[in-house]
Amino acid sequence: MAEDITPEEPRLTSLAHGGGCGCKIAPGVLEGILRGATALPVPPELLVGIETSDDAAVYQVGPNQAIVATTDFFMPIVDDPRDFGRIAATNAISDVYAMGGTPIFALALVGMPVNRLSQGTIRAILDGGAEACRAAGIPIAGGHTIDSVEPIYGLVAIGLLDPANLKRNADARPGDVLILGKALGVGVFSAALKKGALDPAGYARMVASTTRLNTPGPDLARMPGVHAITDVTGFGLAGHALEMARGAGLRVVIDWNSVPFLEGARALAEAGHVTGASGRNWASYGAEVTLDGLTDLDRALLSDPQTSGGLLVACAPEAAAGVLGLFHAAGFDAAAVIGHVEEGAPGLTARR
C-alpha cells in the first residue's frame, strides 16, 4: 500500500450508491430521456450515432478510415483502487473493440471526493486505468478532473477502423448463430462483494474477467460471415441481445443451458446476491422477453448487469467455428454458442 493511502479511509464501494455498469440509468428511463434526439441533423459521414443504441459513434473521415469515439465511466465496483481503475478503463475501451475498431488513445474522466480519499488512493485508481491502457497499447493523452461527492472514473476512448469492417449491433441476419465471449455473473459477484460474501477466489475470477480486454473485436470484424457485434454490459444479456434484435427487426433466441457463467455465480444468486439494477433492467424491457422454462432466478441472471462484459457476436453458421477458434486462441475459454437469430416479431426468447 502506498505511504499516502491512509488506513482510516472508507471503502471505495461505501462511497457510491451503485457500482460498475450497474450504475447505468435503466433502459426504459434512458429511452424516455433520449426520445427525440434522433431528430437532430445527422451528417452522412456519421455512420453510427444513437439510433440503435450502439456501443460507440463512428464518423468517416476518408474512403478507408473512420473514427470510433466512445465514453464510459462509473462508480467503484470494488474497493481496491488499482483494480477499480483497471476495470473501468477496460470497460470503456471495450466499446471500440465492439465496433470492430482498434483503439489509438484515451482521455481520463475523473471525479473524486478529495476530502474523503487520499491522493495515494486517487493516484492508484489512475495508475490502474493507465495499466489497462498500456495493455491495449494506447496512451492516456489528457482528460478532466472534478471534485465529486462520489468517486467516478472512466475514459473517453478513441479508435480507428476501415468502414468496410464496421460491425454494428443492428446487422444480424436470419439464421445467424450467437456467440458470447465471456461468462456472465459479474453483477451477482459485485453484489456479494458489497455484503462481504465473495471469497478471494471469487474476487479473483471477477477481476480476471472484468480486466480482460476484448481484443478479438477487430479480427472478428474482418471475418467473412460475422454480421453484428456488441458487448454485454449494464443492461445484461437480455438487454443487449434485445438491442440486436430491435435493430435487425428479428427475433433473438437464447439457449439458456448453453450460456456460460462464472463459477459460483448461480450459488451466489440463490443466496440472494442479486443487484437492484437487475430488477430495474427487467422492469424496462421484460415485456419484450418470452421466458420458456426459466425460473425467477434465471430471469435475474438474464438481466444481471455486466461490467466489462464479453462480446456478443452474430455470425453465419459456417463462420461459428472460426469465431470460437479466434476467441479461444485469445484466451477466452468460456466463449460459446448461446443461441440464434430467426424471423419473427422483434424481441427475445430465452428457453431451456
Image: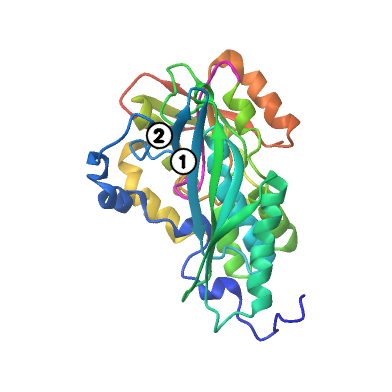
Looking at this rendering, what residue extends furthest in the bottom direction?
8
* Up/down of 3 relative to 239, above or below: below
Residue at image x 44%, y 60%? 276
Asked whether the residues under the numbered discs 1 and 2 touch, taking CB atoms below 8 Å apart as contact, a structural biologist would say: yes
- Where residue 131 appears, as percent x and y from the top left, is 71, 55
Give the number of the disc on residue 259: none
Q: Three-letter amino acid code at disc 1?
A: Ala
| Residue ID for mark 2 | 48
Number of numbered tags placed on the structure image: 2
Determine whether the residue tagged by mark 2 lies in a helix, strand or loop: strand
Image coordinates of residue 304 in percent, x first then y, are 49, 50
Query: What is the basis of the colouring in this image?
Result: rainbow
Q: Is residue 217 magenta?
A: no
- Is residue 179 depicted above or below 25 in this figure? above
Q: Where is residue 155 in the image (x, y as percent from the top left)?
A: 54, 55
Give the side of residue 346 with respect to residue 256, left or right.
left
**Mark 1 or 2, nearer chain start:** 2
Q: Which of 65 and 312 is in front in this view?
A: 65
Say if 256 sits above or below 199 in the image.
Answer: above
The outermost residue toward the front is 62
Furthest residue toward top: 318
Q: What residue type is labelled 2?
A: Val
Give x and y (percent) for residue 121. 66, 74
Q: Give the range drawn in magenta.
A: 223-236
Query: Foreground: 84 or 299?
Result: 84
Residue visible at 46% across and 70% down in the picture: 17
Residue 127 lies, with reference to residue 31, above or below; the image says: below
Q: Residues within 10 Å of mark 2 (few under 14, many from 20)?
A: many
Q: Magenta includes 228? A: yes
Q: Name the residue under label 1.
A: 56
